[in-house]
Image (cartoon, grey):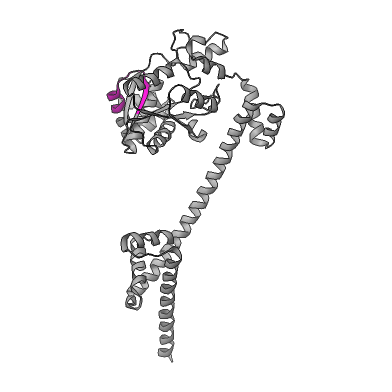
Amino acid sequence: MEIIGLIAEYNPLHNGHLYHINKIKEKYPNSLLVLVLNGYFLQRGEVSIISKYDKTLLALEYGVDIVISLPTLYGVQSADTFADTSIKLLNYLKVNRIIFGSETNDIDKLTLLANKSLELDESEDLKETLKSGINYPTALSKVINESFTYNSNDLLGICYIKSIIKNNFNIKAETIQRTNNYLDTASCEDIISASNIRQKIKDNIDISKHLPTLSKEKICTYDETLLFNLIKITILNDNISDILKMFKATESLFFFEDIRIYRDHKNMVNRLNNCELSNQTKSIQTGLKQLNEINYIIDNDLLSLLDDNTKIICEIRKKYPESSLAEIAQIANVEYGYNIGKSGVNHHFIKIVALVKRHKDSVVKNEKKDNI
């Protein structure tokens, strides 16, 4: 069975998105569709006009089988980070194919550009071109020297393919012809871009023909100035939820709780990273100290004084100087068939330290005798 990945923002979900889903189901009727969905804050710095909860329900209603929320931290990043995180999530769920809309609908050309982009991402020529103030797609086009127009979906598609290649994922990329231009905000066909729909909403133009009724019913407009003032409040004030509850502003309550979760999650990740770094540093320092003890034992022909199991622990520490006690216990189990836990490993190192101390004490004692 094909497990097919989609990556979208659905701001809002419109006829083009339904065309995308239906085309996939038409070509792969027995497939499972997995969607990575961006939530409230979107990749171009905008705020979604449909809540992430409603977008999820709409996606499931119109044919998607599984929806994963793209964390806000990655959903508002550059195209490369946005794409790489989305592809990693899809790979984790064993997706074997991604299908995305494309202006060129030329997967070979996009793959060629993805490979060239990977080769040039760290090149001095690209860095110098970017310093001139032009954007990344234009700079890349100049350095690659390929005749190509970097439209929005094609650019994201290149980033998806780059992630697949870079991470060596077993995912096949495929395109569906995009039928509209992202920058076109004037056309009135049944299928138009999401940006066109949002502009029509601002201009009070009827959008009924461009999206399903369920999607239209979920759209909520907002005052941008008020919204971002409230965002400032929620960052500084933990009582914002109580204020919103008092006014029965359920949609806004979910919105700002999402901001709070993002903020708390980011703080937690920073704390965990700091804690993990500290633990790694301690583990490395301990490992190097133990390695010095073991080398002392070998240099002074004391290895025969250790039992066989302690010798195994010595051998593992020499092979894996930066491993933690728990990791050494796992290695002993897997590679040597020695069933031991973390505390058991620690006990062996206590023996090693004790032997080194006894030998050093005897050396000092003998030196004192010689000096008498």
Q: Is residue 14 left or right of residue 121?
A: right
Residue appearing at x 65%, y 28% in the figure: 230
Task: For residue 282, say whether it is visible.
Answer: yes
Q: Residue at x 35, y 70 (%)?
A: 309
In magenta stretch: residue 32: no
Which residues make up the magenta segment? 98-112
Q: Is residue 111 magenta?
A: yes
Residue shown at 57% from the left, 43% from the top: 267
Residue under the point 53% across and 11% down: 200
Q: Position of residue 268 (x, y in %)?
A: 55, 44
Residue 96: image location, x then y, percent:
33, 33
Image coordinates for residue 240, horizontal then vertical, percent: 68, 33
- Taking 336 as reference, is 367 above or below it? below
Location of residue 37 with respect to 320 vertically, above or below: above
- Image quadrant where residue 317 sits: bottom left
Q: Quadrant of the C terminus?
A: bottom left
Rendered location of residue 61, percent (x, y): 47, 23
Name the foreground residue: 145 vs 85: 85
